[in-house]
Amino acid sequence: MSKQTSAVEPHGWTKFFLHTNGWLVYFFFYAPILLLVVFSFSDSRNVGTWGGWTLEWYAEFAESRNARSALSTSLQIALVSTVVSVVLGTMSALALERFEFRGKQVFDALLYLPIIIPDVTMAVMLLLFFSQFFELLGTVFGIELAKGVGSITLSHIAFSISFVSVVVRARLAGMDSKMEEAALDLYATRWQAFRYVTMPQILPGIAGGGLLAMTLSLDDVVITQFVTGPGGTTLPVYVFGLIRKGVTPLINAISVVMLVASMLLVVLSLLLERSRSGSGTA
Amino acid sequence: MNTKHWLRLLAGLFTLTLLAAACGSDDDESSGGADCEVGEIDGDLAMYNWAEYIDEEQLQEFADEYGISYSLDSYDSNEAMQPIVSEGGSGFDVIVPSDYMVSVMISAGSLMLLNYDAIPNSSNLSDDFSNLYFDPEGGYSLPYQWGTTGIAVNTAVVGTDFPRSWGIIFDPAISGQFDGQIQLLNDPRETMGAALKYLGYSMNTTSEDELAEATELVAATAGRLAAFNTDSADEFLTSGETVIAHGYSGDMFVQFLETDNPGDYVYFVPEEGGTRWIDNFAIAHDAPHPCTAHTFINWMYGADQGAALTNWNYYNTPNAAAVAGLDEDLLDFVNDPAVLAGGVDSLEALEDTGDFEVNYSDAFVEAKG
C-alpha cells in the first residue's frame, strides 16, 4: 500500500488553523495524562501539591492487600471474559456474515442491544437475572450459587460478545468469500477452510475485538458493581471507593499502572496488525 | 414441533421462577433474628464495607482466631450497596450502611433482626447512641463509627481566643479581619444546616421562613469567603489558603496529623450544634452465615478490637470500652471535651426531608449568588 498525498493540501491560514487545532487536541488528550503521571511521584498526600519525588505511592500500591487482590480479580475476570467472548463473538460474526438462517435478522438486531442500551439498564437487568436465576437453581435443583467473580465474568462476556462480533464482522465484510469457496472446491474440509484461509485473514479483527473486550472488562464499573458478590471487588470499583476518602497520589499510581498496561495492549495490537498486513495477500 | 417444545420449556421455567420468587418472599418473614450461640461459627465471613474502612489485618486476625477464611469487598456509596443486598442472594453477611440507609433498608426488609444474646459485647455501646432515629429499637443495627461536621481553625493565625460558635464564620464582628480566608462546604444540607443552627433552628427544618432567613445569612457571608468547597476543605486549611474551615471531623484529624505542627489546629462542633453521621454494623436479611456475622460483630465490639478499628480509620468510636485503647494523638483530638462545645445532645443527623429537599438546593444556589 503506497501513501498518496492529497492534491488539495491546505496552505496558508487554513493550514495554520488546522495545525493549531491538531496540537490543541493532542494537548487536551495528553496534558492530563502527563500531570497524572508526574503527580503519582509526588511526596505529598494532597494531589495538586508538589512535595518532591518519591516512589512511596507505588510501594503502597504493592503493599496494599486490597489493591493487589482487586488487581488480580480484575485481571482474572478480564482474561476469562475476553477468551470466551472472542470465541463466541467470532462464531456469531461468521454465522451472520456467511450464512442464511431463520431468525437471522432478529438475532442480528439483538446482538446490538448491549452496545445500545445504557450500562445502568443492563446492570439492573443482570442483577435481577442473577438473583432470580440463582434462587431458582437453589429451590428447584438444590444448587447453591453465589454472586461474585463468576457472575461478573458472565456479565462481561455478555456485553463483550457484541463488540467482538461487530469488529470481526467489519473485517469479514471486507474479505472475499471466493477464497473460502476456492478452498472448499479444492477439497478442504469446512474446518480446514476456516483454519487456513478465513482465520488468518480475519485475525487482526479478532485480535482487535479481543483487545476491545479486555479494555471494556478492565474499565467497567457500573455493571460490575451491580452483579458483585463476595470476592468480586475489581480494581476500578476499588478506586471509586478510594476516591470517597479523598484523592491521594495512590490513585494516580494505580492509574499509571493501568495506563501502562493498556498502552502495552494497544502497542501489541498495532504490532500484530502490522505484521499481518505486511505478510498479507491483500 | 421444535418450537413448541421450546415454548413449553420456557413456560415451565417461567412458572418455576415465579414459584421461586414466591417462596423467596416467604423466606423474608423468617428473618426474625438468627438462633446463634455466643461465638458460634457457621461458615466463612463475607463482609461488604466502604473502601479502606477496616484493616484487613484485623479481619485476618478474626479469621485465624476462629479458623475460617474471610472476604472483604468494598462499595463507594450507600446507594451502590443497597440494591445488591436488597435484591437478595448477594452472599454478603456483614454490611455497613449509614444512618438514613439503615431506615431505608429496614423498611425494604433487607436487614436481619440482630440477636443480642449472641452479641454480649454490645453492652460496650456508649449511652450517646441509644434511641437513634433510624433504628429506634436498635433491633437491626449497631453503630460502627461516627463523625461530625464542624469548624477547624488555624490557631497560629487566629489565636485561641474565639467563641466556639458558628459566629466565627457568620458574624463579621468576630472574624471580619479574616475575610477571604474562610471556607464553607459546597453542600446544600450541610451549609444551610450550619446557618440554621447559628440562627437557633433545626437543620432538618421544613419551614420556608426559617430557610429564607438562613439563605440571607449565607448570602451575606458568601462575599467574605475564599470558597465554597467540599473535597479540599482540609487541604485549604493546612496549606494556608484558609484559616477558618467548615469540614468533616475525620478528614480534619487526618490532615492535621499530616502537618509538621498538628497542635496549631483545632476542630470543634460549635455550641449551637452540628451534624453527626453514624455508620452501622448490620447483617444482610439473607446472610449465608448469620452466626459467623453475629460472632464477628461481637468480636469487633470488644474493647481491644474497637480501639484497633478506630486507630486505623481515624473516625470516632461508639464503643465506650474502646476509648481507653485509642492512640494518644487521636485521643487529643477526639476525647478533648472542647470538640463537642454543645455536648452530644446538640448534635443532629441530617434526615431526609422528602419534597422539601429541593428547597434546600434552591436556597443554596440562591445564597451562593
Image (cartoon, rainbow, N blue to C red):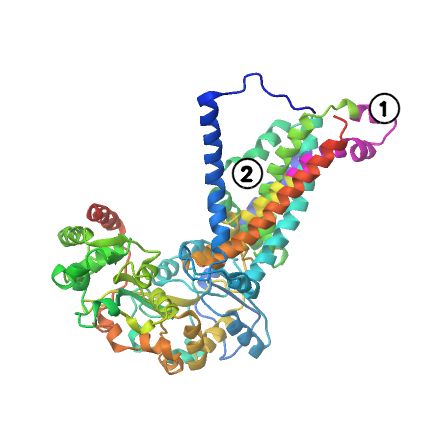
Subunit that carries the residue with mark 1 = A
- Outermost residue to the left: B173
Q: Amino acid at mark 2?
A: Pro
Q: In the displayed structure, would residue B195 be above or below residue B262?
A: above
Between A122 and B159, the residue placed more toward the observer is: B159
Magenta-colored span? A180-208
**Neighbours of disc 1 within 10 Å: few (<14), some (14-19), many (20+):** few
Where does the image place residue A222, in percent across and percent down from the top left? 49, 48
Q: Residue at x 46, y 73 (%)?
A: B297
Identify the secondary structure beneath mark 1. helix
Give the main secondary structure, helix, strand or loop, of the magenta stretch.
helix
Where does the image place residue A35, in percent across and percent down from the top left? 47, 49
Q: Which residue is mark 2?
A: A114
Identify the secondary structure beneath mark 2. helix
Q: Does the magenta run of residues contain A267? A: no
Q: In the displayed structure, would residue B53 be above or below residue A47?
A: below
The answer to which quarter of the image holds residue A205 is top right
Marker disc for residue A250: none
Q: Which residue is mark 1?
A: A185
Q: Residue at x 63, y 38 (%)?
A: A164
Q: CA distance from mark 1 to mark 2?
A: 38 Å
Query: In the rendered image, is residue B87 in sight?
Result: no
Q: In the displayed structure, would residue B176 be above or below residue B271?
A: above
Left or right of B210: which side holds B310?
A: right
Dividing the image into 4 quarters, which one contains the C terminus of chain B? top left
Q: Is circle 1 on the same chain as circle 2?
A: yes
- Outermost residue to the right: A187
**Marker count (numbered):** 2
Query: In the rendered image, is residue B103 in sight?
Result: yes
**Neighbours of disc 2 within 10 Å: few (<14), some (14-19), many (20+):** some
